[in-house]
Amino acid sequence: NAGVTQTPKFQVLKTGQSMTLQCAQDMNHNSMYWYRQDPGMGLRLIYYSASEGTTDKGEVPNGYNVSRLNKREFSLRLESAAPSQTSVYFCASSEGGNYGYTFGSGTRLTVV
Amino acid sequence: SQQGEEDPQALSIQEGENATMNCSYKTSINNLQWYRQNSGRGLVHLILIRSNEREKHSGRLRVTLDTSKKSSSLLITASRAADTASYFCATDEGGRRALTFGSGTRLQVQP
């Protein structure tokens, strides 16, 4: 099925551990995004990539790094996880500009 | 404060009734979008309205945009239990190249 695929779906980390969240889309979209959603709240933008080869910081980039590996894939890395990074992480893609986003199903991350 | 704030935060109605949610934003936009999120799932795009449009329809959804008041409303007509979800508005305020989301309206439709 066409769409945005995120892996893993669930992850528990210990404080200080590192991990990479993977995201891939098969819709040939130019733009990709990483958001986090905390309980009862909306989404906050971590990083985005408007096109292959570019990445930009969003509202809450501290503690994260990203890589736009190619047009399909956009990964999010936590170098040293902290309990404050416990959240649900969503990847999305779009054609950019005046187009809607297609979201993945999310990664539920718990940092203990 | 967050951009794209929805009102009310929570809404409970009976099946068959209409549900109206509102969204306000602070600066100029190119477009405003509405999304639905079922519990434990990702967001699903519902409708996009451009800044030069005033009203848009999609099935049982009706969206209005008033740029002079910097506000939008989402109307769901003849609601169904399956419409139970959280609804978010999102904007590209300030020329940002990524959407900013509000905190959402939780809609409960009682069968």
Image (cartoon, helix red, strand yellow):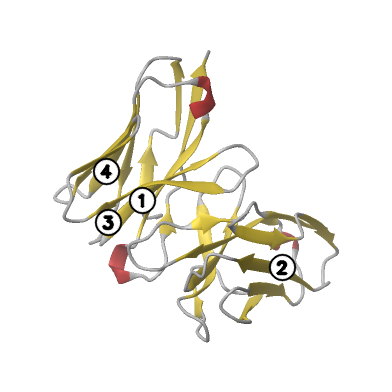
Which quadrant of the figure has residue A22?
bottom right
Query: Measured along the vertical axis of the image, is residue A28 above or below residue B34?
Result: below
Given this view, does label 3 or label 1 mark the residue nearer the observer?
A: 1
Q: Earlier in the sequence, mark 3 or mark 1?
A: 3
Residue position marked by numbered label 4 in the rendering: B72
Residue position marked by numbered label 1 in the rendering: B33
Look at label 2 and name its amino acid.
Leu
- The answer to whether B102 appears left or right of B71 in the picture is right
Disc 1: host chain? B
Which quadrant of the figure has residue B62?
top left
Q: Earlier in the sequence, mark 1 or mark 4?
A: 1
Q: Is residue B3 visible?
A: yes
Spatial CA distance of label 2 from label 3 is: 33 Å
Secondary structure under tag 2 reads: strand
Residue position marked by numbered label 3 in the rendering: B26
Q: Residues within 10 Å of mark 2 (few under 14, many from 20)?
A: many
Residue drawn at (57%, 73%) of the image: A61
Residue A83 x/y as whole percent: 75, 60
Disc 2: host chain? A
Q: Residues within 10 Å of mark 1 (few under 14, many from 20)?
A: many
Q: Are marks 2 and 3 on the same chain?
A: no
Where residue A31 is drawn, which disc sits there?
none
Residue position marked by numbered label 2 in the rendering: A21
Look at label 3 and name its amino acid.
Lys
Residue drawn at (80%, 58%) of the image: A11
Secondary structure under tag 4 reads: strand
Secondary structure under tag 1 reads: strand
Q: Are marks 1 and 2 on the same chain?
A: no
Disc 4: host chain? B
Which quadrant of the figure has residue A7?
bottom right
Query: Measured along the vertical axis of the image, is residue A90 above or below residue B108?
Result: below
Given this view, does label 2 or label 3 mark the residue nearer the observer?
A: 2
